[in-house]
Image (cartoon, rainbow, N blue to C red):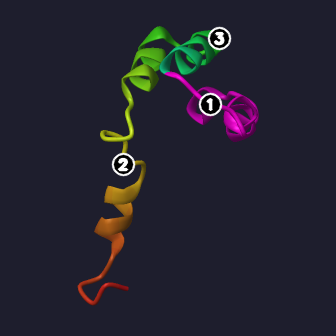
């Protein structure tokens, strides 16, 4: 969302999810309201907890041999 200049993306998602039961349908509806390209929407809709690693691979690659 930040990539496409969506204002306050974290706050928007927090507002949608905080203290609420979230379903796939709710997330799909939210993504469809975003003013981003359709390809980006499809990428977001394809994310799952099992497939999303965020920047973990970049963080791991930046570690030195000694783990620091």
Whole-angstrom CA distance, mark 1 to mark 2, is 23 Å
Residue 63 located left or right of residue 9: left
Secondary element at tag 3: helix
**Horizontal and vertical percent position of residue 47:** 39, 30
Q: In which quarter of the image is residue 57?
A: bottom left
Q: Which range is magenta?
A: 1-23
**Horizontal and vertical percent position of residue 13:** 67, 33
CB atoms of marks 3 and 2 within 8 Å? no
Q: Mark 2 points at which residue?
A: 53
Q: Residues within 10 Å of mark 2 (few under 14, many from 20)?
A: few
* Residue located at (65% from left, 11% from top): 33
User: Residue 20 colored magenta?
Assistant: yes
Residue 62's place in the image compared with 52, above or below, is below
Q: Residues within 10 Å of mark 3 (few under 14, many from 20)?
A: few
Q: Name the residue under label 3.
A: 33
Q: Quadrant of residue 60?
A: bottom left
**Horizontal and vertical percent position of residue 3:** 57, 33
| First in sequence: mark 3 vs mark 2 | 3
Quarter of the image that includes the N terminus: top right
1 or 2: mark nearer the eye: 1
Whole-angstrom CA distance, mark 1 to mark 3, is 19 Å
Q: Name the residue under label 1.
A: 21
Whole-angstrom CA distance, mark 3 to mark 2, is 24 Å
Secondary element at tag 1: loop
| First in sequence: mark 1 vs mark 3 | 1
User: Residue 7 colored magenta?
Assistant: yes
Give 26 or 37, whichever is nearer the viewer: 26
| First in sequence: mark 1 vs mark 2 | 1
* Residue located at (76% from left, 33% from top): 15
CB atoms of marks 1 and 2 within 8 Å? no
Secondary element at tag 2: loop
């Amino acid at each position: 969302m930040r990539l496409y200049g969506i204002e306050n993306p974290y706050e928007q998602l927090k507002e949608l999810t905080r203290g609420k039961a979230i379903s796939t349908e709710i997330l799909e509806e939210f993504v469809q309201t975003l003013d981003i390209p359709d390809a980006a929407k499809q990428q977001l809709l394809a994310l799952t907890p099992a497939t999303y690693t965020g920047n973990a691979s970049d963080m791991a690659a930046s570690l030195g041999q000694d783990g620091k």
